[in-house]
Image (spheres, helix red, strand yellow):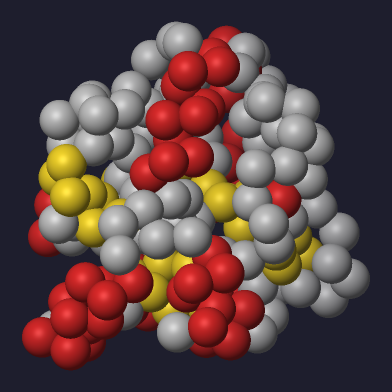
Amino acid sequence: MSESSYGLSVVSSIEEYHQLVQSNAGQRLVDLAELIPSVVLDIRYATPDNLLGEAVYPEARALLREPVAEALAQVQASLADRDLGLCVYDAYRPYSITVRMYEQIQDENFAAPPWRGSRHNRGCSVDVGLVMLSNGKRVPLPTDFDELTPAARSRYGDLPAHVMLNRSILLATMQYHGFINYPGEWWHFDHQSWAEFDLLDIPFDQLASA
């Protein structure tokens, strides 16, 4: 494990990642598109449609640690009873991307500081919205992803009743399956097991070849 320039211990080699997985299979990063084929991916950081205005991921992939991914699969199954499904905007994020984001934004309200790291770096956070399973249409929610306005707060109340109901369904279903919402962003959820996992800085292309 190496130390970042901000003093954090970070797993930054694919070999060390393999060692972690060999010692505990739950450390493995699972591809959500493979585990949950019905999930919709809208990975904004693989496009310019994000806070930075440029693509910072080389490809649109959503990865989570195995127990976190399995919990999200349970969320998807629960939502299906309402003809709803998840749209995933972001999941695992390499630590170096978190550093880059903070150095450009420089606001802890909008970007995790690199001296703390993000739970996205642990493969334990996911940003999600809702879609209708029957037709793939987006379900109305308070704001777009990463639209950092007061309406993005999870308890913001000046909204149409149907939007508040949709938000409540998302929050309640995620919470039931072990996810904790970040109150400043209705879309952001950390799995309750996040402290069990190290920060990672493994690029997507290395994980793909792994």
Q: Position of residue 182 (x, y in %)?
A: 37, 33
Instruction: Tell which of 179 and 83 is nearer to you.
Output: 179
Residue at the spot x=44%, y=35% of the render? 98
Q: Position of residue 119 (x, y in %)?
A: 31, 45
Which quadrant of the figure has residue 197? bottom left
79 on left or right of 26: right
Instruction: Tell which of 24 and 178 is nearer to you.
Output: 24
Q: Is residue 137 above or below residue 14?
A: above
**Quadrant of the snapshot with the N terminus:** bottom left
Instruction: Tell which of 132 and 98 is nearer to you.
Output: 98
Q: Is residue 25 above or below residue 159?
A: below
Which quadrant of the figure has residue 11? bottom left
User: Quick check: can you spot residue 125?
Assistant: no
171 on left or right of 61: left
User: Quick check: can you spot residue 39?
Assistant: yes
Residue at the spot x=68%, y=80% of the render? 38
Residue at the spot x=41%, y=67% of the render? 64
Q: Position of residue 156 (x, y in %)?
A: 53, 18
State how many labels appear: 0
Q: Is residue 195 above or below residue 188?
A: below
Residue at the spot x=46%, y=50% of the render? 93
Instruction: Tell which of 109 and 10 is nearer to you.
Output: 10
169 on left or right of 184: right
**Quadrant of the snapshot with the C terminus:** bottom left
Which quadrant of the figure has residue 183? top left
Q: Position of residue 94 (x, y in %)?
A: 43, 50
